[in-house]
Image (cartoon, rainbow, N blue to C red):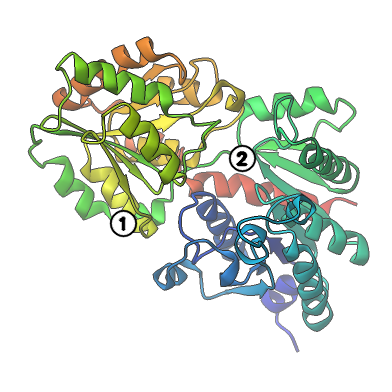
Amino acid sequence: MKNRSDMEKQSKRVLYVAYHYPPILGSSGVHRTLAFTRELANNGWDVTVLTTTLKAYENWSESQLRFIPENIRVIRAFARNVAKHFSFRGKYLGAMALPDNWQSWILGGVLSGIKHIITHGKPQLIVSTYPIASAHIIAYCLSRMFNIPWIVDLRDPMAQANYPTEPSRKKWFLWIEQKFIKHSHAAIVTTPGAKTFYEGKYPHTPKDFWHVVPNGYDEVIFNELSDKIEQQRHKASSQKIVLLHSGLIYPNERDPSALFDAIQQLKEKGQLHADNFLLRLRASGNEALFQQWVEKRDIQDLVEFAATIPYTDALNEMTEVDGLLIMQAANCDYQIPAKAYEYIRCKKPVLALTTETGDTGRLLRDTGHATIAPLDDTKKIEAALQAHIENCQKGLPQALSTEKIRAYSRQYHAEEFVQVVEAARKKP
């Protein structure tokens, strides 16, 4: 006879559709899904993650596989990046990249999902996560085919007034939104602003449809680094201030040109030079373009482009540098990048090039860690950069208690996520 635990686990099976999952490198989103699937497994759920083959990832490291808990099953379905695998001389049909560059994953994911459901039984719930929109289409197809409740982890808004800029992609995003509004049991966003945005856009949705489960830092991984962090906190500072941006920089949503202008002006005034300042852009992407911008301003001695490194190494680096940088345009006011929470956990001064009224600006202002200036205002960035350097030299007083910092962890928010999942499972 099956014991009670086995029977309960059979009634709590979840299929989690996510592009970002270890061993991928270069995306903080992977750790949101990792924390949520880990928390579900710890709460008695039988968790299967439906993701892509490793060939679909731009960067990955075998060392990242250790983060996947042993009690989580991972299915790697066929998928390719159209820009990398299906292009000819750098060109490919635009229709092949809709709703995103991993369109091939839709067929691979659906077929792998069908095989898994037939082999292992129907799950009680499907969860899909953006920003790879194909994940939502896979989840929609499987949900409709097998009549399985579906939760959408949107993270950030999809179709907005000025995003996506391509009409064909926006049409796909709107179609996906309409499908999950009609057929899913709940939708999760990461900020109050995103929830307000969607409630205004779809006012007919029930009050309990939208949920806010913020991003956060991973306390499990930070605990592994605790000794290292303490050593770095007591390390004597050098003459050179190192300012770090860790992660992708998009030419539009995180346009660094005004920052480069500010650095150029401070260099021309003699206030910044190679002996006292370095801006390090770690795993920024678009390096060839940004390198041109840097050389045009003659600040290549003050800006360093660094390669992608494993996640724990990236966190270590955050604890070692003097200051941390966030860049976010006004059209991203409804978003908070995961690195903002990691920066809070590192307890280092932050230069936040964003609006003070957006969700990211409000978060960092309230934690007392940031100097804030608009991303596109060179003069204000120049003043903020000077103030930030002074903060780095003086050191940042501890503004938050350990208990308050924990409230920004993925483990804390994962508990909220599990509550949403349990509620959806019990819905009629």
- Viewed as shown, does residue 192 lie left or right of 249? right
Give the percent coordinates (x, y) of residue 169.
77, 42
Q: Which residue appears at 38% of the width and 36% of the height?
A: 292
Q: Which residue appears at 67% of the width and 75% of the height?
A: 5
Q: Which residue appears at 51% of the width and 70% of the height?
A: 69
* Nearest-to-viewer mark from 1 and 2: 1
Give the percent coordinates (x, y) of residue 397.
22, 25
Q: Which residue appears at 26% of the width and 35% of the height?
A: 300
Write down the residue under mark 1: 313
Badge number at residue 213? 2
Viewer-proximal residue, 280 or 387?
280
- The image quadrant of residue 4 is bottom right
- Viewed as shown, does residue 66 lie left or right of 204? left
Amino acid under disc 1: Asp
Residue 132 visible at all: yes
Amino acid under disc 2: Val
Tell me if residue 367 comes above or below residue 223 in the rendering.
above
CA separation, marks 1 and 2? 26 Å
Badge number at residue 208? none
Quarter of the picture holding the N terminus: bottom right
